[in-house]
Image (spheres, grey):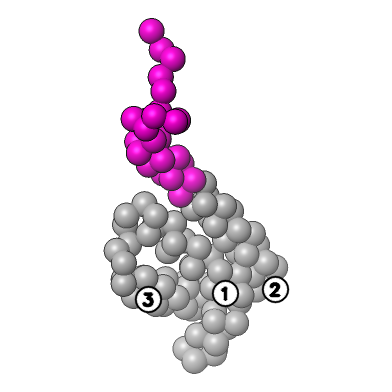
């Protein structure tokens, strides 16, 4: 199998693309990936996927892309949910910081 076939296989596995996109978005939320750098990170992870697939085929490791693809999609869904959760937590803290001194919702009942 040549490198062109490997690239086409990695790009054809939909779950892998979703996993890469979700992972990069979570890294953006965490501040690891800066604005505008996402395409570079995605390309790097795509290249990493090609290298891993090449090594797996070179060492004749048994794997089935028809099974792995959907599993990667499930992992991507988890990462998307995690990213949304992180945004929700961050949004709640930001709203609290803004609203805590306002007269309508910023009242404290602590002694």
Give the class, few, some or many, for how many residues have Cα within 10 Å of label 3's Cα (few <14, many ≥20).
few
Q: Earlier in the sequence, mark 3 or mark 2?
A: 3
- Residue at the spot of label 2: 66
Residue drawn where x is 44% and y is 31% of the image:
104
How many numbered discs sit on the rendered protein?
3
Contact check, label 3 and label 2, Cβ < 8 Å: no
- Residue at the spot of label 3: 39
Q: Earlier in the sequence, mark 1 or mark 2?
A: 1
- The image shows residue 95, relative to residue 44, as above or below, that is above
Magenta residues span: 86-111
- The image shows residue 84, relative to residue 68, as above or below, that is above
Marks 3 and 2 sit apart, C-alpha to C-alpha, by 26 Å
Q: Can you give x and y, in whole percent of width and height, for residue 16 in the image?
A: 56, 70
Mark closer to the observer (3, 2): 3
Is residue 103 shown to the viewer in this render?
Answer: yes
Q: Is residue 103 left or right of residue 7?
A: left
Does the magenta portion include 6? no
Image quadrant for the N terminus?
bottom right
Mark closer to the observer (1, 2): 2
Q: Earlier in the sequence, mark 3 or mark 1?
A: 3
- Residue at the spot of label 1: 60
Contact check, label 1 and label 2, Cβ < 8 Å: no
Marks 3 and 1 sit apart, C-alpha to C-alpha, by 31 Å
Q: Can you give x and y, in whole percent of width and height, for residue 89 in the image?
A: 46, 41
Quadrant housing residue 51: bottom left
- Of residues 111 and 55, which is closer to you in this image? 111
Per the image, label 2 sits on a secondary structure element best described as: helix
Per the image, label 1 sits on a secondary structure element best described as: loop
Per the image, label 3 sits on a secondary structure element best described as: helix
Q: Can you give x and y, in whole percent of width and height, for residue 91 in the image?
A: 43, 45
- The image shows residue 70, relative to residue 98, as above or below, that is below
Residue drawn where x is 57% and y is 74% of the image:
60
């Amino acid at each position: 199998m040549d490198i062109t076939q490997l690239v086409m296989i990695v790009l054809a596995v939909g779950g892998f693309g979703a996993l890469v996109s979700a992972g990069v978005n979570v890294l953006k939320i965490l501040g690891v990936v800066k604005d505008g750098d996402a395409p570079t990170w995605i390309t790097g992870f795509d290249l990493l996927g090609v290298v891993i697939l090449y090594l797996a085929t070179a060492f004749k490791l048994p794997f089935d892309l028809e099974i792995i693809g959907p599993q990667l999609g499930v992992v991507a869904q988890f990462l998307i949910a995690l990213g949304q959760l992180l945004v929700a937590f961050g949004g709640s803290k930001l709203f609290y910081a803004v609203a805590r001194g306002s007269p309508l919702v910023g009242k404290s009942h602590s002694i």
